[in-house]
Image (cartoon, rainbow, N blue to C red):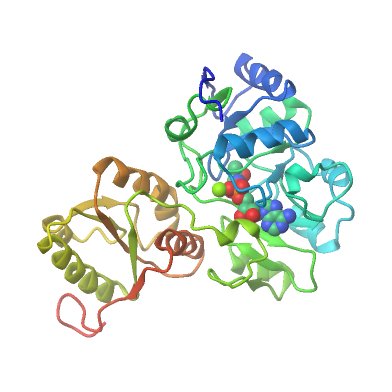
Amino acid sequence: MENNLATRCLKVDPVRPETGAILEAGRILNRGGLVAFPTETVYGLGANALDGRAVARIFEAKGRPADNPLIVHVACREEVKHLAKNIPPAAEILMDNFWPGPLTLVLPAGAAVPPETTAGLKTLAVRMPRHPVALALIGAAGVPLAAPSANLSGRPSPTTAEHVLQDLNGRIEAVLDGGPAGMGVESTVLDLTGFVPVILRPGGVTPEELRELLGEVEVEAAFGDRPRSPGMKYAHYAPKAPLLLVEGAPGAVAARLMELAREQKALGRRVGILSCSGSRDYASVGEVVLAGRRENPETVAAGLYAALRRFDELDVDLILAEGLEDSGVGLAVMNRLRKAADRRIVAGSPVSFNGKQP
Ligand code: TXA
Ligand code: MG
């Protein structure tokens, strides 16, 4: 892959983006170029979804496996009719309720979508983002945009333009810098092609919200043998140092984490601690990065990827991460942490840090 493009950083107002920068970015996309842009989840790397050659460049720039399909981003619902072969009633209900927003729907693909975008699948993933910059950019391009997260494949998703440049400087034509992305974790991917809707990737819209509208909704296991979402089989979201995830009740997590951190420190290792409890005891055993507050999983979602990138800068030998509850957006956060841990997951200690049973 050529690594010598002069990547332009175009500043843009996140609330009122109708500026020259958007028009310029639209022109780049129309010429088959790549533009990274903020969404209400993470930064995406956009190309014209209907131009197979432009889409192929996304795979090159990211080093993305060719069998991992992309999400097509639209600026209006009407566009879905041109992309999907048919739109089931459940999809209409979900679009009414969650679009624009962090919900991606997997539908039967129509003929207009090139195989590069769907990675040769007969299905298509589509979403309408809520971020004004994303909507303005799709409008300026006049075509739907295929956009994965704008990171090198395997790295944590970017939540700022700076993260995008860390990974893709020299590999893409431009990044629209509209400040920090919104939620910090990616959209929920929901497969509507089967009998029962299946969450292939938990994200910004929670299972609880979906069940309220649809009734039964399955959640695919984080480590299924044959994941239906091709992207979920790759060890993902990984910082450079190995990450070990400690799951369980808060006291039990803190106790086990302290024990492990002390052990590792005694072995001469530089320990990173990804915390959402803010426990002050950790500072004596490692480099602590606070990702947010356990009681408020939205804050952990917003801080998660920046925290993982921070550990790369701190050059730690390993990362011990505190788990949180699998409810609400916490499920999406735990999904990403479990992927980052790549099966290095341990339970909290049976005796909590203050000596009481958790
Ligand atoms: O929030 C988001 O969804 C962000 C922003 C930029 O919109 N995008 C994003 O894209 O996270 P990406 O490529 O990093 O993740 C897309 C996920 C992958 O796990 C991929 O395998 C899955 O969606 N996917 C795409 N098309 C699919 C399809 N036809 N069937 C099943 N899964 C699909
Ligand atoms: Mg991604």
Residue 88 is left or right of residue 233, and the answer is right
User: Where's residue 336, x and y in %?
Assistant: 47, 59
Q: Quadrant of residue 137?
A: top right
Q: Residue at x 75, y 53 (%)?
A: 95
Q: Would residue 192 be visible to someone looking at this image?
A: yes
Q: Nearer the viewer, residue 109 or 1?
A: 1
Identify whether 109 is placed above or below 264.
Answer: above
Q: Residue furthest front?
A: 1
Identify whether 170 is placed above or below 151.
Answer: above
User: Where's residue 130, x and y in %?
Assistant: 64, 41
Q: Residue at x 67, y 70 (%)?
A: 212
User: Where's residue 228, x and y in %?
Assistant: 67, 65
Q: Residue at x 65, y 16 (%)?
A: 24
Q: Nearer the viewer, residue 347 or 317?
A: 317
User: Where's residue 71, x and y in %?
Assistant: 68, 46
Q: Quadrant of residue 256?
A: bottom left
Which quadrant does the C terminus fall into? bottom left
Q: Residue at x 22, y 52 (%)?
A: 288
Q: Nearer the viewer, residue 163 or 134?
A: 163
Identify whether 311 is placed above or below 131.
Answer: below
Residue 261 is left or right of residue 177, and the answer is left
Identify whether 16 is placed above or below 228.
Answer: above
Residue 117 is left or right of residue 184, and the answer is right
